[in-house]
Each structure stands twice: as C-alpha cells, then as structure tokens.
Image (cartoon, helix red, strand yellow):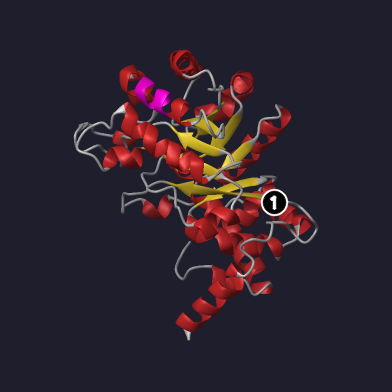
Amino acid sequence: GLILEESELSSMVNRELYLPAKTQDDKQVEILLNAGLSADTNIAINQGVDGVGLYRTEISFLLQQRFPSEDEQFKQYRSVLASYPEKQVVMRTLDIGGDKALPYFPIEEDNPFLGWRGIRFTLDHPDIFIIQLRAMLRASCESHNLSILLPMISGAQELDDALQLIEQAYDEVHELDNRVRMPRVGIMIEVPSMLYILPLIAHKVDFVSVGTNDLTQYLLAVDRNNSRVSDVYESMHPAVIMALKQIHDTCKQYQLPVCICGELAGDPMGALLLIGLGYETLSMNTSNVARTKYLIRQSNLAELQDLANKALSKPYGSDIYSMMLNYFEEREFTGFIRAGKK
C-alpha cells in the first residue's frame, strides 16, 4: 500500500509543479534550487523553480585529481548559467573543509568543523580564490544572471577581504571583456556571530543566505555526523527558530533579500514554519521542489504565522515538532513526512 500511496502522492504533486508557489490567501513564495553536479539539468524541474539559490561549486573540485583550471571552471559555470536564462543563479565560492575534504589537498585537523573551511581556506589561498572568481565572472558575461555567495563568513574582516578580491577579479576580467557586470554579492549566515553583526555589515552585501544545517550545528555545539550526540541535533530547536526569526527581522529592517538554503527549507514541516516566520524565498534539492510547492498551495499564510508565533514561545523542540505534526494530521498532509524523520 505504501508504494502506491507514494506514487499517487507524486503524481498529484507533480501535476502542480508549474503552478506558482502561492498560499491560499495569496502569499507568493519564491522556490529556488540547490544544485551541484550538473546543475540538475532536468528541464522540467528548471521550469518549476524561480532560479538557483545555491550552486555548490566544490562538487567539480571534489571530482578531480587536482584543482580545476580557470578555463575548466569557466566552461562548467557558463553551462550552468546558460541553463537558467532570465533567472538568478547563486554560485557559492569554494566551500571545502569540515566534512568535505579534497582528495588532493588533505587537511589534518582535530576539529574540522571549527577549522579551516569555507572562506577561511580561500582567503588563505587568494590564488585559488581569484581563479574561481575570474571563471565565474567570465562565465556571466553573456547571461548576466550570476550572484556570488560567500560561505562561512564569521566577521567583518573576512567579508572586506573577500570583497576586495572580488573587485580585483572584476577589474582583471573587465580588461578582457567589457560586457562583464558586477554581480550581486551575498553572505551565508551559518556562524552564530553573524546574527549580531549583520546590522553592521548589511550595507556591504546585496543579499543573505541562511545555511540552517551549520547554523544549527554551531548554535547547539553538535556535530551532526557524530552518532553520540546526533539526538541533540534538533532542526526545530527553539533557539534555532528564534535565531531564524531574528535573521528575518534584521534583513527586513535593512531591506536585504534573504533566502533559506539549508535542509530545513526542503523539509515539509520546516518549509511551512519558515514561511510562517516571514521567509519568502526557499532553496532546496530537486526532490523537494514539487511537494513543497504543493504544500504551500494548500496552506494559509495567516495559519502558518500563527504556528510560527506559537513555536517562538515553546521551550522544547519536541513541542514545536508535535505542533507541526498536529497541523499536518489535521490537513491530511502526513504522507509528506517521511517515516521516522524528526
């Protein structure tokens, strides 16, 4: 019976893939794609999304035996940008370290998640960073739909240093091709320090993207790959929900576009809770696009706001989860929650 339900669910959901993600009381939500390997060249899905919210550039680095050249990167990025004409593609600069090690550049660390990863690595290797930035900028000369996203920013100095290198890469590419335009530049919020200094650097960036997986792991001091403490990793922990609320409110105050691109955005309960908190842009893996759009179309913004407000007053993550589960049961959405997922 379960397989049948699953396929019925899929066909019901997929019929609505091309319809806008709009709640029943007319709140439009932007649905973007998290992409990597081939930018998910599935044309159907491409048409069902509003753009790419996170293109993970490190995938092509992980598949090689050496650092890819500027030309190799340029070709890769150009084909991705060309797959989404008229739609924004957010390319995150190289994010290695933590659980993503390059086979040809081993990094030995006692605590890799608090170590040399993301922007810290690229700022220590400006040569690698500049090559990647040049490749991105060259790739965008025709389509002009590139946005650049900086991972693991934890302070203003890293941002300033990265922006300076982006300027330098831009100047170098401009000499080769004057069609190049300065892309939008944004930062990932995944290190808790950014919750506090966001107001101080808001004027330096064009948008913000929230990586809920790392933000949760750093807020709760939990390595989610460590089985001993994996039960402490709660994606709906009250502190995580409060932090997300604060990020949303700060971005609204400073008129900064904000997108959620962590796993929470593609999780059925998480997506609806985020919309209730005020988020209007969610970026997720291909497999979650159709069902998330379907759930949004069946929901009511006023009810989701009510759920989010209640969530902000609950001391236990399990209470928030139960409340969302209740909501799903009342609306007969439980088929969307994968068994045993919490």
Q: Name the residue: 69% across, 57% down.
A: 20
The magenta-colored residue range is 130-135
Q: Name the residue: 59% across, 25% down.
A: 198
Whether residue 321 is visible to the viewer of this picture, yes or no, is no
From this viewpoint, which residue is outermost toward the bottom? 1
Q: Is residue 46 left or right of residue 223?
A: right
Q: Name the residue: 21% across, 33% down.
A: 66
Q: Name the residue: 41% across, 23% down.
A: 134
Q: Position of residue 226 (x, y in %)?
A: 31, 49
Q: Is residue 317 above or below residue 198?
A: below
- Residue under label 1: 276
Q: Secondary structure at mark 1?
A: helix
Report the predominant secondary structure element of the magenta stretch.
helix
Q: Is residue 20 above or below residue 172?
A: below
- Amino acid type, label 1: Gly
Density class for disc 1 (Cα within 10 Å; few <14, some 14-19, many ≥20) is many
Q: Position of residue 92 (x, y in %)?
A: 45, 34
Is residue 113 located in the magenta-colored stretch of the structure? no
Instruction: Please name whichever residue, 69 or 248, is drawn nearer the observer in this view of the structure.
Output: 69
